[in-house]
Image: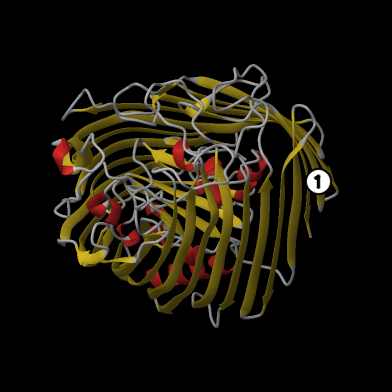
Amino acid sequence: MRSMHAPSPMHRPQTSARRPLRLHAAAILAAASALAHADARADDAADPVFTLGSIEVEGTRPDLDTDSQVQLGIDQIRAEDRQTVGAAVSLAPGVYVGRVGARNEEVAYIRGFDLRQVPLFIDGLPVYVPYDGYVDLGRFTTADLARIDIARGFGSLIYGANTLGGAINLISRRPTAALEIDAGAQQDFSDDGDAIRHNLYANLGSRQGQWYGQLGVAYRDQDHYDLPGDYAPTAVEDGDDRDNSDSTDRRISLKLGWTPRDGDEYVLGYNRQDGDKGTPPYAGSVDGVRARYWRWPYWDKQSAYLMTRTVFGAHELKVRAYHDTFENSLYSYDDATYTSITRPYAFRSWYDDYSNGAAVEAGLQVTAGNRLRLAATWKEDVHREHDAGEPIRHFKDRTWTLAAEDTQVLAPGWSLVSGLAHEARQSLQAEDYDDGSGAIVDFARSDNDALSGQLGVFYEPAADTRLRATYSHRNRFPTIKDRYSYRLGTAIPNEALSSETADHFELGYMTQIGDTLHADIAVYYSNIDDLIQQVRISDDACSSPPCSQQQNVGKVRAQGVDMGLHGGWQTLDYVLNYSYLDRSNRSDPGIRLTDAPRHQGFASLRWHATPSWSLSANADAMSGRYSSSDGSQRAAGFAVFGVSTRYRFGQAYSLSLGAHNLTDRRYAYSEGYPEPGRSYSLRIEAAL
């Protein structure tokens, strides 16, 4: 049975141009609440961002939030040629991109927290996989997005349960004109001139009076990628073309909206993501690590949803309801020929999952200086799995949350944000398969519940300067996999797992000096208890020793600094990000904490040589990181560089040329899984 199915990154940039910080408490006190909300809704109607899909810790007016999360705009994502969500989110300070090599999944870590603890949302709707809480960010393209919101530790409780370390929310676009069209095509080439990847996308939008519609399509196909020229061949990888590195992704998004009056909005939407991929085999030299010959014939996800917002004077009511499905298959082959499935470790496995969910949120303007939000969320996850020749096993969880979030103006320039949420998870069904008798039996089941809360003080001494001090207590419930996976016969289940907990403390400073400098610096400390970790137990309990069990034994401390700087001077634009992360395993220092490096930096410089022509250079750098908890696997630190040039033909068309991994550096996010060598790209874009 398969047990593991497995322009600048700054604080609150705009999608097209830089702007100064917005006024907060002073503006709140300067206007009556009803008039303020009317103005905000009028501005919202002209916003190309689908703001109904945004979930933020807001101020006492809906257009004045607390600046407690990072936003990445689509212009900066495209300027840096970040075609997948995993590549895009790494532009934000405190977010570390990675790759789960054995599953060929693009992942991200926010201040050391993985995607189980920092779930992915699209327009506020959860899209992570029900079984294990993960999602492959490499399967999600960025072409139809307006921006990406990233909450780091202190984020809105309205997201619901399991946001232990934050949340990633992909915000789609919304048309503001009668006809909006943008499209692009990109071809990537290897160092020896082979066509290795192509990418196509198109977005069509129209607003007709009270109605609007948005359509987005994207197609991304990779034949393979080339390894760096100095790569030394191994027993399972001969170099040049990376074995089994092909992938294909197709995406379509639809949205139909009705805005009968200012502030009211009613939307029906549909997202579909279809993909297939290979998994490049382990190519390292660590003894005991076996190469896996895996292919994923399909990796398909789709969501249908309804979102509404109805205003009542200064108050509003929001409703979200959705149905999300996830289907995939995994074939494990005998060897690198990918033709036979006969050996004990080879199998064919299928998942067929779905989630139903809903959320109701009320925003109440209690006084001119006090905004209260009340929310209830509900989500029901169904996981169905089986291997070839075995019956289907069923698992079902229900999760719900009741949350309150309040923002209070204390005095001119001062505001207080507080929140409290009760979260619960119920295990409704969990089936086990006895391969000896061929019978389906029930696992023992248990439930979880927890309280989450947060408190933040925000001070604005001037219109261009803001300070914050925040505290947040968050939880994550164990997933179906955490509780019931046999891990290919090497583990026994533990249905009694408790929730993981984390306490986050942060001090932040943000300032802007005209267009020359925007700075956001955060110092944080996180204390994690009851972390779920693998514990060695008696080998007699497992069919394939060494034997382990998932238990709540982990205690981890994480502390660090995130810094983002960006600005411009005459014809130059610059970006400089730096993140420092210090994590320690207080429960067992001998177990290494994996995948998030201690140091990470990003730099970008763009020269606007003429109004139509620009030249850019960028660099990504990371220190080394452990890829295994015993320390035997470690990926070395690296720095990779890229250059590009772009020429605009009028206002509608542009042509871009780029080189990635310019020095053909040999590097890896996970030991034994080398990343692509030097490549080149040609991109044509049009916006009408």
Is 640 placed above or below 153 here?
above
Say which quarter of the image contains residue 477: bottom left
Pick whichever, 48 or 270, lies toward us.
270
Judging from the image, the colouring scheme is secondary structure
Q: Position of residue 114 (x, y in %)?
A: 36, 42
| In-image side of 682 versus 44 (left or right) | right
Q: Which residue shows up at 79% across the image and 60% down it?
A: 688
Residue extending farthest bottom: 260
Residue extending farthest right: 649
Q: Position of residue 208 (x, y in %)?
A: 68, 78
Q: Which residue shows up at 57% across the image and 69% down it?
A: 45
Residue 29 visible at all: no
Pick whichever, 572 or 438, lies toward us.
438
Q: Position of residue 475 (x, y in %)?
A: 23, 51
Q: Which residue shows up at 48% across the image and 24% down it?
A: 284
Element type where label 1 sits in the image: strand
| In-image side of 551 versus 582 (left or right) | left
Is 509 placed above or below 369 here?
above
Marks counted in the figure total 1
Say which quarter of the image contains residue 391: bottom left
Q: Position of residue 429 (x, y in %)?
A: 23, 68
- Can you identify the residue that label 1 sits on? 654
Q: Callout 1: 10 Å neighbours few (<14), some, many (20+)?
A: some
Residue 228 visible at all: yes
Pick whichever, 344 or 406, lies toward us.
344
| In-image side of 431 versus 636 (left or right) | left
Q: Which residue shows up at 56% across the image and 65% down it?
A: 272
**Label 1 amino acid?**
Ser
Pick whichever, 322 or 132, lies toward us.
132
Is 122 placed above or below 343 here?
below
